[in-house]
Image (cartoon, rainbow, N blue to C red):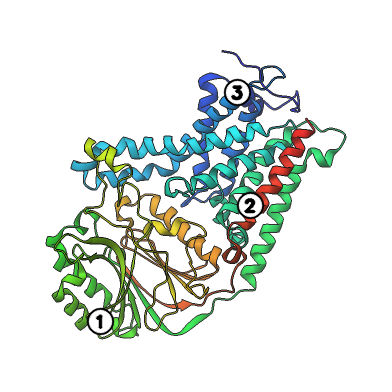
Amino acid sequence: MAQTADITGVQAGLSSLPHRIILADGWARRAIAFTAGAAGALALPPLDFAPAMAFPLTAAVWLIDGAPVQGARFSFAPIRAAAAAGWWLGFGYFLASLWWLGAAMLVEADQFAWALPLAVIGLPAALALFPALGFALSRLLWSSGSLRIFALAAGLGASEWLRGHVLTGFPWNDFGVALAQAGPLGQAASLIGLPGLDLLAIVIFAAPATIVDRRPARPFLSNAAAWTAAFLLLTLSAYGALRLATSETEYVDGVKLRLMQPNLPQDAKFKPENGQEILRRYLALSDRATGPGRTGVADVTHLVWPESAFPYILSREPQALAAIARALQGKILITGAARIEADGGGRRGRIFNSIEVLQGDRILAFYDKMHLVPFGEYLPFEGLLRPLGVSHLVPGTWDQGQGPRTLAAPGLPQMSPLICYEAIFPGEAAPRDKRGKRPQLLLNVTNDGWFGKTVGPYQHFAQARLRAIEEGLPLIRVANTGISAIVDAYGRTIEALPLGEEGVIDGRLPKAAPETVFSRWGTAAFATIWGLFLAAALAGRSQG
């Protein structure tokens, strides 16, 4: 059915592309939204072509411009049309950027291949509800001038924030990642975090849509969005370049790290019969000489192994603990491990995905993962789904740990432990202790072997690196198949092992930077910017 497009304020002599997008209807409109969303994935790791984010966000402006108007009275029709366009754009974006999740269903294909369509298509379809909501909110604030860009930022920025919090949240591949990966621009995360970057990214990458707008008598106001985008780009670039140029990487005295990346195939990792061979491989790799001046583990003070390193409960394997003690010669080992907490009544007790700190054959400290992966480590809506034969991917029944909290290891500053998925949540990566002191180090152990050599591990590493910038803390990251790295407090990668390679990293521990604005105030900056953008959108609406 033909629709009447809201093209008020858009020049009659529009170039053909925006004109066609605004007037598109039916499946043509859906295809445009889907394709534009998919093109936005080019801005994400590992390609990091930031300008590609202009495809979905510029198209978003014209798609909402094209929502139908039915007279002067309020109508839900334009809101429904905007929401539908937002869903298709979001579906394309998430399908193109999260397809790699399907690889996890093929690790044990005999059990989980049936779930491949749910991971590859179902999850993007569900996540697309958030851009749909964002478009609908934006349409409520819409106007005909360039200030409508701020309506898009207010609506879509709010829906991105909700995506990071609803049902435990999934803040993966936010629009702001395009800025976070764009060299010096990413340093703004130390001020406003990923939520603030989302808002700025929407304005910056949507502003080109206003270039074709008609120029009224007040040219500055007519180009407010474009001027704001240009100002933001220049300011963020200058701030980031200055912050990096004036901040040298300093190191903690007396700490010599070795990070071990075993590159174990995922299908072998959780088989108990492979336990002894896995441990032998870990110990041999950990003691590998990496150069003429290196003799192996004797040269280091701290050794770090990845998440879920063993297919058994390490604390209940005295032979394994003894072998580790003999090989490591008193060095500190920090490793991922399953941990059991017996209830004293002969029942199963509680089982946690943990990080354990070992010296000799003694476990000195531990941290239990508190933010479990939905459908990976626990089953949402279990009472409904379990009777249907649905189960989670990781074998066993995993319990939620108490946290967040810090972790102590001899010879290291206080650490914030992050197991896998826990590194993706802005504002939650560096909890303070009971005295209000922040940690001095982010420790992220993970196992991305589920996803093979896809784009997923690159995106995961980018998320963890962004936490370092936000918090002003160095990052030690150890991944089974990669990417393992030492990152300084400004997000600069000091040492790294590529995806899919076996090896070790020897390096020093960078010092923490001064406390960042985001570390101290959290999402206050996001709320302030969002309020300013909302005010600008309302001002534009009052002007017609």
Residue drawn at the location 55% of the way across and 63% of the way down? 470
Q: Are marks 3 and 1 in contact (CB under 8 Å)?
A: no
Q: Which mark is residue 199?
A: none
Amino acid type at image mark 1: Leu
Mark 1, residues whose alpha carbon is within 10 Å: few (<14), some, or many (≥20)?
Answer: many
Across and down, in percent, residue 430 comes to 48, 66
Among the two numbered marks 2 and 3 on one chain, the one whose residue lies closer to the N terminus: 3
Across and down, in percent, residue 485 comes to 41, 67
Q: Which mark is residue 527?
A: 2
Q: CA distance from mark 3 to mark 1?
A: 67 Å
Q: Is residue 538 above or below residue 81?
A: below
Q: Is residue 35 above or below residue 306?
A: above
Amino acid type at image mark 3: Phe
Q: Are marks 2 and 1 in contact (CB under 8 Å)?
A: no
Q: State the quadrant of the N terminus.
A: top right
In this view, the mark in front (2 or 1): 2
Amino acid type at image mark 2: Ala
Q: Quadrant of residue 271?
A: bottom left
In this view, the mark in front (3 or 1): 3
Among the two numbered marks 2 and 1 on one chain, the one whose residue lies closer to the N terminus: 1
Q: Which residue is mark 1?
A: 328
Residue drawn at the location 60% of the way across and 41% of the way down? 54
Please say whether residue 74 is visible from this viewpoint.
Answer: yes
Q: Secondary structure at mark 3?
A: loop
Q: Are marks 2 and 3 in contact (CB under 8 Å)?
A: no
Q: Nearer the viewer, residue 404 or 129?
A: 404
Q: Which mark is residue 76?
A: 3
Q: State the quadrant of the C terminus.
A: top right
Residue drawn at the location 68% of the way across and 32% of the way down? 142
